[in-house]
Image (cartoon, rainbow, N blue to C red):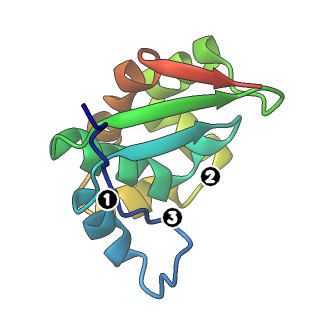
Amino acid sequence: MTPKRVILLAHTDSDNLHDLRELIQHVIDSSVLVVFQSKKVLERPWCLLELYAAATHGIPIVALCCSGKGYDFGAATDFLTHLDSALPKVNKAAIGVLEANGVSAEQAAHARWLLNCCTSELP
C-alpha cells in the first residue's frame, strides 16, 4: 500500500502580515497551530489571541518546548491562572489588545490547560 501524502499550507505570523487583525483569520483557516514555547510567549497578546482563536474554533494546537528558551510549565500555569493581574505587570498594553479583539483575560487564560498537555520537547 502506498503511503498517503498530505499537503498542508503553512502560515507564520510574520508572513506578509500588514494588518494584525488578519492574524486571527489565518489561525482559523489553518489545519493546526504550532506554538513554540519560550519564556515570554504568553506575555504577547497576539500569541494569546492566536491560542484563543485556535481553541475556540477547534484548531489543534501543537506546543513545542524548545530547550534553552526558558519556558517553565509551573510558571506558565501560574501566569495564566493570574493572567488578569500578571499580564499588565510585564506588558501594560496587553489587556487592552485582548479586549479590543473581544477576548477577556479570563477567556485567554483558558490556554493554560492546552499548553501543559500534549507538548513535545525539542533539543
Please determine whether, in this image, residue 20 is positioned above or below residue 61. Answer: below
Can you identify the residue that label 3 sits on? Answer: 12
Q: State the residue position of label 1.
A: 27
In 3D space, how far apart are the residues under numbered discs 2 and 1 (Cα atoms)?
A: 23 Å
Q: 104 or 53, which lies in front?
A: 53
Query: Which residue lies most toward the bottom here?
Result: 18
Structural crowding at the residue carrying mark 2, measured as other residues with C-alpha within 10 Å and reported as few (<14), some (14–19) or many (≥20): few
Dot 3: element:
loop
* CA gap, disc 1 and disc 3: 10 Å
Residue type marked 1: Val
Q: Quadrant of residue 11?
A: bottom left
58 shown above or below 80 = below
User: Which mark is on residue 91?
Assistant: 2
* Amino acid on which the number 3 mark rests in the picture: Thr
Left or right: where 72 falls relative to 60: right
Residue 121 seen by the camera: yes
Q: Is residue 59 left or right of residue 35?
A: left
